[in-house]
Amino acid sequence: MKLNKTIALVAMILLTAVTLLGCGGTPVLAAKVGDQEITVTQLENSYYNSLSYASAYGFDTATEDGVTQFRDYLLDNLISSAMEIYQAKLAGITLTDEELAAAKETAENNYDDTFASFVEQATNAGSTNAEAYAKKLFTDALIQNKTTVKKLQADMLEDAMNEALVSKHRTALLDNVKMTDEELLAKYNEVLADQKGIFEQNPSSYFSYQTYAQYGYNAPPLYVPNGFFRVRHILVTDEVTANLIKTKIDAGEDFEALLAEYNTDPGMQSEENAAGYLAGEGASFVEPFLNAALALTKDGDVSAPVESDFGWHIIKRVSTEPAREIPYAEVKETFELYEQALYLQQYHSDLVSGWIMDESLVTRFPENYASVGK
């Protein structure tokens, strides 16, 4: 019984493009966007594939209202995707031979990955012949979803081609769309004011913003709150060397000279970190390093050797960082990159929302999908 559930789940996740046929062989539609059809099966697959993430999006699927809201949210997403495909085709977007070849390669890779996942399922089940058992699992999933290998491959190719069309259309739509210098400067002042309030109330938030900014999830920090300081450190691989260095420092030898001789952390050699690493509560250092740094109460203090996963550290607090606004010129490149990307994303989202508002293009069939999730 457990194995059958596994097959069904894998099929549900992987075969999202498959349509369920009604008695007369006609797809049962959940919605239609222009000439793009969204089937009930696509909505069902989307629902069960996303169910474990429902709470993260604020939906309580333990209640009937929560199920309905989550289902409708997913249908809205499917409608948005279908609308983008429809509008790309309406705009006359076509693919070059090279783009078609790339889409075909993407589809083939997706199919290979799909079958590989069944091989993994078979291997995890302890099969002595994983390849043969995977073929059986795969065939069972195809039958359960009323499709064939040929149909699945065709669906995957169509999906890859549609993704390429949408991407190409999006590029065309956003060509020359960007924030002006004046808008960017105004946005900088707005974000600076917001961050200043947040960081003064919770200084450790600075480091969260710094980490997320590295991955493009928010603007870089624009304000340094009180309570931070700069540290430099000497990293070596063994305790004996670390103790030797600390003895030399205690005897009056120059910390920077010893750093140049012994240090193995390339970050300490970069111009960017010439003033030292910024430290404070919440800084994203490994715990032993951060605790040792926070224990340094005044500029010039040097820690005893401390071990972390990276080796042995001797840390010096070199300066207290004053609270300050980070000038626009210092963060201009990173800030503009983030804000321009956010602006383009919102601009495109508004376009799609406008298309969806056209009731002549979107038809829903709630009588067909009312039972999804229930």
Image (tube, rainbow, N blue to C red):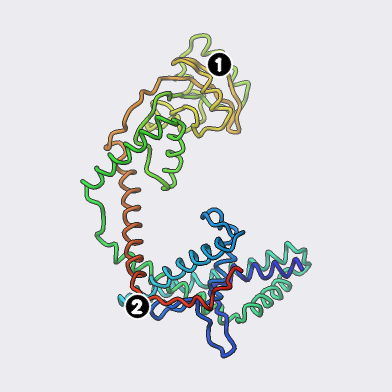
Which residue is labeled 2 in the image?
360
Q: Residues within 10 Å of mark 2 (few under 14, many from 20)?
A: few
Specify the amino acid type for callout 1.
Answer: Lys
| Spatial separation of the CA atoms under disc 2 and disc 1 | 76 Å
* Nearer-the-camera pick, 246 or 208: 208
Q: Which marked residue is nearer to the observer: mark 2 or mark 1?
A: 2
The N terminus sits in image quarter:
bottom right
**Vertical placement of residue 157 versus 343, above or below:** below
* Nearer-the-camera pick, 343 or 76: 76
The numbered disc on residue 246 is: 1
Earlier in the chain: of badge 2 and badge 1, it is: 1
What residue is rendered at 59% in x and 61% in y? 51
On the image, which quarter does residue 110 sit in? bottom right
**Vertical placement of residue 217 versus 19, above or below:** above
Relative image position of residue 30 (x, y in whole percent): 50, 76
Q: Residue furthest top?
A: 251
What residue is rendered at 58% in x and 26% in y? 312
**Vertical placement of residue 327 versus 155, above or below:** above
Relative image position of residue 62 (x, y in whole percent): 62, 59
The C terminus sits in image quarter:
bottom right
**Vertical placement of residue 369 versus 231, above or below:** below
Q: Secondary structure at mark 2?
A: loop
Specify the amino acid type for callout 2.
Answer: Ser
On the image, which quarter does residue 238 sit in? top right
Q: Secondary structure at mark 1?
A: helix
What residue is rendered at 63% in x and 23% in y? 239
Relative image position of residue 114 (x, y in whole percent): 60, 69
